[in-house]
Image: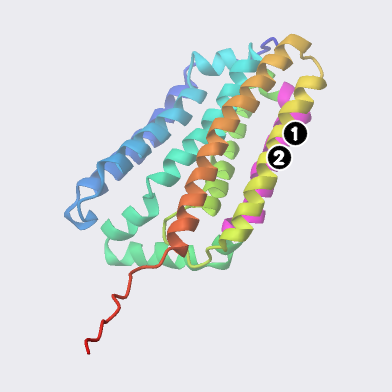
């Protein structure tokens, strides 16, 4: 896998601006008295989530992704699976609704209740955007375009992050959502999505994309399959835990023993 015009110069440093802005906004909300003693681990999740996607668009990882398919597969896992998982676990919308002033909080609440949000947060829609993006990335002309153009690499990374976040939030999200789907539907969608991801990895292993050597395809496919499997197992555990907690009785009624 060779790079042709992949250099992005110093433009990638511009990504520090939104990353730092997001971190400062989240940290400010976390320490605000309105946050209600926000758990430190959620702040850690958000910080690590931003860092996980940021490293995929910065050198040296961004440049290596244009030269090594295994590194590109690793970038896919970081931006499309690990970072969304960490960001969803940080519950940013819950924090925003607690700490924003009344007017912007109401606007955000209306947005979360909108039909558009309902469409995007529906597990089937989120899964199609997420899985479809992965298939397009590895099985169309998008892959060589990413090799040749760093801006295309950035755009694909943004899609992976956004679609991955929507999918993860639709499956295990705990932020306020008036349109939360039932556990059975979420479980079915998760299983089918895992199957699609595994099939994609296996087909890449058996039938490398054009311009990719068999050895490079095998290495990248193994990264996708086993690395993705670990993160998918985390999703399964978290979904099962939520499902179990929702089905567990909230309290026990102590029986009254009558004497005589």
Residue 11 placement (x, y as % from top left) = 49, 22
Residue at image location 46% in from the left, 51% down from the top: 241
Quadrant the N terminus occupies? top right
* Residue assigned mark 1: 199
- Contact between marks 2 and 1 (CB within 8 A): the answer is yes
The relative height of residue 223 versus residue 238 in the rendered view (above or below) is above
Residue at the disc numbered 2: 195
Task: Please tell me in which quadrant of the rendered image residue 155 appears.
Answer: top right
Q: Nearer the viewer, residue 128 or 105?
A: 128
Q: In this picture, is 115 found above or below 73?
A: below
- Give the position of the C terminus as an image quadrant: bottom left
Q: Is residue 135 visible?
A: yes
Name the residue furthest left.
33
Image x and y of residue 125, in percent: 66, 54
- Farthest residue toward the front? 260
Specify how the rendered protein is coloured.
Answer: rainbow
- Residue 163 is one of the magenta-drawn residues: no
Q: Residue at point 38% right, 50% down? A: 91
Which residue occupies 45% across, 68% down? 110
Along the horizontal axis of the image, is 252 left or right of 206? left
From the viewer's side, name the closer residue of 7 and 31: 31
Nearest the viewer among 52 and 215 is 215
The number of numbered discs placed on residues in the rendered structure image is: 2
Give the main secondary structure, helix, strand or loop, of the magenta stretch.
Answer: helix
Above or below residue 138? Residue 128 is below
Q: Which residues are magenta?
A: 120-144
Q: Residue 111, position in %: x, y?
A: 47, 63
**What secondary structure is found at the residue carrying circle 2?**
helix
At horizontal 46% and vertical 54% (from top left) the residue drawn is 242
Q: Mark 1: few, some, or many residues within 10 Å (few <14, many ≥20)?
A: few
Q: Is residue 142 left or right of residue 94?
A: right
> Separation of disc 2 and disc 1 at Cα?
6 Å
């Amino acid at each position: 896998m060779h790079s042709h015009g992949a250099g992005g110069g110093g433009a990638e440093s511009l990504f520090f601006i939104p990353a730092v802005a997001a971190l400062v906004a989240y940290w400010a909300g976390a320490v605000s008295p309105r946050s209600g003693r926000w758990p430190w681990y959620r702040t850690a999740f958000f910080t690590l989530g931003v860092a996980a996607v940021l490293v995929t668009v910065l050198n040296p990882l961004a440049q290596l992704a244009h030269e090594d398919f295994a590194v590109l597969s690793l970038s896919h896992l970081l931006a499309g699976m690990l970072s969304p998982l960490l960001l969803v676990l940080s519950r940013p919308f819950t924090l925003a609704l607690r700490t924003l002033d009344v007017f912007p909080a109401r606007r955000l609440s209306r947005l979360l209740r909108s039909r558009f949000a309902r469409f995007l947060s529906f597990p089937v829609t989120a899964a199609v955007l997420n899985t479809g993006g992965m298939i397009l990335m590895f099985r169309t002309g998008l892959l060589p375009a990413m090799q040749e153009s760093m801006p295309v690499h950035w755009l694909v990374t943004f899609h992976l992050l956004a679609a991955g976040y929507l999918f993860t939030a639709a499956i295990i999200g705990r932020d306020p959502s008036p349109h939360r789907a039932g556990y059975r539907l979420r479980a079915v969608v998760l299983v089918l999505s895992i199957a699609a991801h595994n099939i994609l990895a296996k087909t890449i292993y058996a039938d490398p994309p054009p311009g990719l050597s068999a050895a490079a395809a095998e290495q990248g496919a193994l990264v996708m399959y086993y690395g993705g499997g670990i993160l998918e197992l985390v999703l399964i555990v978290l979904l099962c835990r939520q499902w179990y907690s929702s089905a567990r009785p909230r309290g026990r009624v102590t029986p009254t023993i009558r004497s005589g």
